[in-house]
């Protein structure tokens, strides 16, 4: 039997010390990590992950909202093995191509909730949103509107961590000391009705107020300087913020008045998470383009993608002809392994009727989550499909949050046995929701 990392006889048993010595962790409190150390996982199966000591955990966040099919799917493993044996790498630069990329592009076009001319592949959600910005700028130059470059995102949004996408993200911690956000990125209100709705204000009135605030921002900046608005149908890392009634309808009316493109960031909401293939369908959004990643491969391998509408594609064709090349892409754009795994993942989603499955189990998820709403530490329990959160509060009536530096989500207070169990579950959900 293979020794585990918890086995003192194992030559590499001290993973915690070695981790602290060698690894720079993404999105981690590096100071706290030096004393707390890592949680080292060794294997996974279905919805469970196991640490080196063999302790089993439910992976309640589906990795980072990405392991849609769970762990250890033998069909996907076999597909990956076959693809790596047949064609382990081929790039798409300079017009080269391969069958898995072509087939996957066709499949995404067919699934896309918006008219799509072409599909562009990346390795992550960040790269895909970064590409959205590059294409928006290139397109506006190509169509003779070179002033139209600003992108509007929302406070508390999360769109990635490259220089451009961390700028889009509306979470202060991704900007502080990184000298971000960069120029040409603006932020408008985040829709958090439970927290920010005024006394007596209906969801619809709150949505109108936010739409008006967006329009004021556009008019202040100059409508002809704004290229696009980007939004997650449900804000994930910002706290699972579900849009209030009529919010997207009103926002889209504002954008349409000013000829501003809508980029829907479906990185979390895509592939059935909200009970439809796309969050845009759940919330009546008709975007110009969508970004996807994560569940596209059920996280078996990294991949992201975005759709390109016909009018934008035509402009790119014309401009690339002038410049000699559409000079954008990644070595691993459309990696054959990622494409083959994505195709198999989508085939399985269709076979198991994942949308119907989410709709069937979501009411149970909602029931159990909402049962925690009357806990003294829970301000709000909210969910849509299989995306949910408990908002922990210091003062329930005043809806007052804990100071983030207290790390309440990660460390539940000591309470009597039954209560402690409740708080632990809510803390786990909320603290994890605070991460991308
Ligand atoms: C909505 C959204 N967009 C973009 C990203 C960035 O994706 P990645 O981490 O693959 O770069 C994330 C990651 O969590 C996300 O939640």
Image: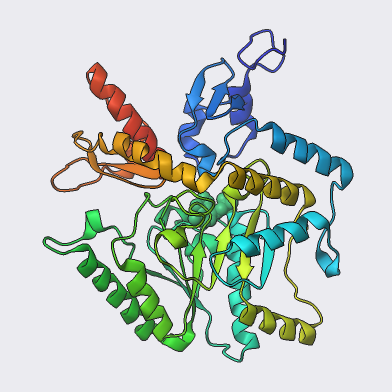
Where residue 178 sits in the image (x, y, percent)? 51, 58
Residue situated furthest right in the rendering: 86
Where residue 433 sits in the image (x, y, percent)? 41, 43
Q: Residue at x 19, y 36 (%)?
A: 374
Is residue 38 visible in the rendered image? The answer is no
Quadrant housing residue 160: bottom right
Is 216 in front, or is 28? 216
Q: Residue at x 52, y 84 (%)?
A: 148
Quadrant housing residue 15: top right
Residue situated furthest top in the rendering: 9
Q: Is residue 25 left or right of residue 334?
A: left
Where residue 213 sits in the image (x, y, percent)? 29, 75
Q: Residue at x 22, y 18 (%)?
A: 416
Where residue 427 sits in the image (x, y, percent)? 34, 34
Compared with residue 373, is residue 336 higher up or lower down, i.e. above or below? below
Is residue 9 visible in the rendered image? The answer is yes
């Amino acid at each position: 039997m293979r020794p585990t990392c918890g086995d003192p006889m194992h030559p590499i048993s001290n993973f915690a010390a070695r981790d602290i010595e060698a690894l720079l962790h993404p999105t981690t409190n590096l100071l706290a990590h030096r004393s707390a150390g890592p949680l080292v996982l060794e294997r996974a199966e279905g919805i469970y992950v196991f640490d080196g000591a063999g302790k089993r955990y439910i992976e309640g966040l589906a990795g980072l909202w990405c392991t849609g099919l769970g762990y250890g799917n033998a069909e996907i493993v076999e597909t990956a093995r076959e693809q790596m044996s047949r064609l382990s790498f081929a790039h798409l630069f300079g017009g080269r191509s391969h069958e898995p990329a072509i087939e996957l592009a066709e499949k995404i076009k067919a699934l896309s909730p918006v008219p799509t001319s072409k599909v562009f592949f990346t390795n992550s959600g960040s790269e895909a949103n970064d590409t959205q910005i590059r294409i928006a700028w290139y397109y506006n130059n190509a169509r003779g509107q070179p002033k139209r470059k600003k992108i509007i995102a929302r406070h508390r949004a999360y769109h990635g961590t490259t220089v451009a996408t961390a700028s889009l993200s509306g979470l202060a911690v991704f900007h502080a000391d990184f000298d971000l956000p960069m120029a040409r990125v603006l932020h408008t209100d985040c829709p958090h009705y439970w927290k920010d709705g005024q006394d007596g204000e209906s969801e619809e009135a709150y949505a109108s107020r936010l739409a008006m605030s967006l329009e004021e921002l556009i008019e202040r900046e100059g409508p002809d300087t704004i290229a696009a608005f980007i939004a997650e149908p449900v804000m994930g890392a910002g706290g699972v913020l579900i849009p209030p009634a009529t919010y997207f309808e009103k926002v889209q009316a504002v954008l349409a008045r000013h000829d501003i493109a809508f980029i829907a960031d479906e990185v979390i909401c895509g592939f059935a998470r909200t009970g439809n293939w796309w969050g845009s369908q759940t919330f009546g959004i008709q975007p110009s383009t969508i970004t996807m990643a994560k569940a596209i491969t059920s996280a078996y391998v990294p991949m992201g993608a975005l759709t390109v509408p016909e009018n934008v594609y035509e402009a790119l064709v014309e401009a690339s002809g002038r410049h000699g090349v559409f000079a954008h892409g990644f070595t691993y754009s459309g990696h054959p392994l990622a494409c083959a795994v994505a195709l198999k993942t989508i085939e399985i989603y269709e076979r198991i009727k994942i949308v119907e499955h989410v709709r069937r189990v979501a009411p149970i998820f909602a029931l159990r989550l909402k049962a925690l709403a009357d806990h003294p530490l829970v301000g709000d329990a909210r969910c849509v499909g299989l995306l949910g959160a408990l908002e922990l509060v210091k003062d329930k009536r005043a809806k007052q949050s804990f100071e983030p530096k207290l790390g309440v989500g990660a460390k539940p207070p000591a309470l009597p046995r039954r209560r402690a169990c409740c708080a632990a579950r809510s803390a786990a959900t909320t603290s994890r929701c605070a991460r991308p």
